[in-house]
Image: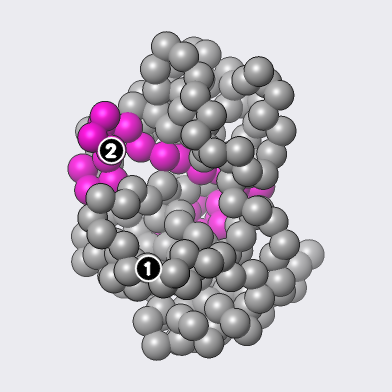
Amino acid sequence: MEYYELHPDNPQKRYISKAVETLKEGGVIIYPTDTVYGLGCDIFNKEAVERIYMIKNETDTKLFSFLCSDLKDISKYAKVSDFAYKSMRKLLPGPYTFVLPAAKEVPKKLWTKRKTVGIRVPNNEIARTLAFELGNPIVSTSATTRKGETLFDPLEIRTVFNNSVDLMLSMGALTGVPSSIVDLSGDEIEIIREGSGDLSLFY
């Protein structure tokens, strides 16, 4: 695995470009977000998505969310109501995953049975830049052990994933908790998981 340490205030563009190149070639990377480290690939690369299922020891019934570069991008991949847009506009970029009706452009592998998808726009410039420069959303699933334990220390992550992931961008230890998951796909708001971020808007 290629491993690059990024400066927290002025991340080296050449390392981010290497990560984008890896994504374009169908690779799997680990990258920082505004909560925890993410394991990702191009959502349109079926083989790479399958690799992430294998790496995480997950079955095909486990749904992965994906990361867009900005709020405008979301409308390409999901059906967004006026209410959903107004809510997301107040909170994004931020530590939230929003569940929305899937648009036909999204691979059905990432659809739930209810034909929804989970979308993130994190408050992390590196993560958003990866999606922007790739030109597609990237898979967003936490870097965890096969037992589901979230890893925060880059050196520990490097040890666990060294032989299964192509590249890692490190920003040091991240101390966040996973994103809050908010379902805006129906007539009623449903908080699926309370994690990072203020959810008072929905109560």
N-term-proximal mark, 2 vs 1: 1
- Residue 185 is situated, as x and y percent measured from the top left of the image, at 40, 23
- Residue 151 is situated, as x and y percent measured from the top left of the image, at 58, 70
Mark 2 = which residue? 112
**Residue in view at x 60 percent, y 82 percent:** 156
**Residue in view at x 55 percent, y 43 percent:** 121
Local secondary structure at mark 1: helix
Mark 1 = which residue? 56
Q: Is residue 118 magenta?
A: yes
| Direction from residue 175 to residue 165 in the image, left or right | left
Local secondary structure at mark 2: loop
Q: Give the extent of the magenta segment.
A: 108-137
Q: Nearer the viewer, residue 174 or 130?
A: 174
- Residue 32 is situated, as x and y percent measured from the top left of the image, at 60, 63
| Direction from residue 112 to residue 32 in the image, left or right | right
**Residue in view at x 42 percent, y 39 percent:** 118
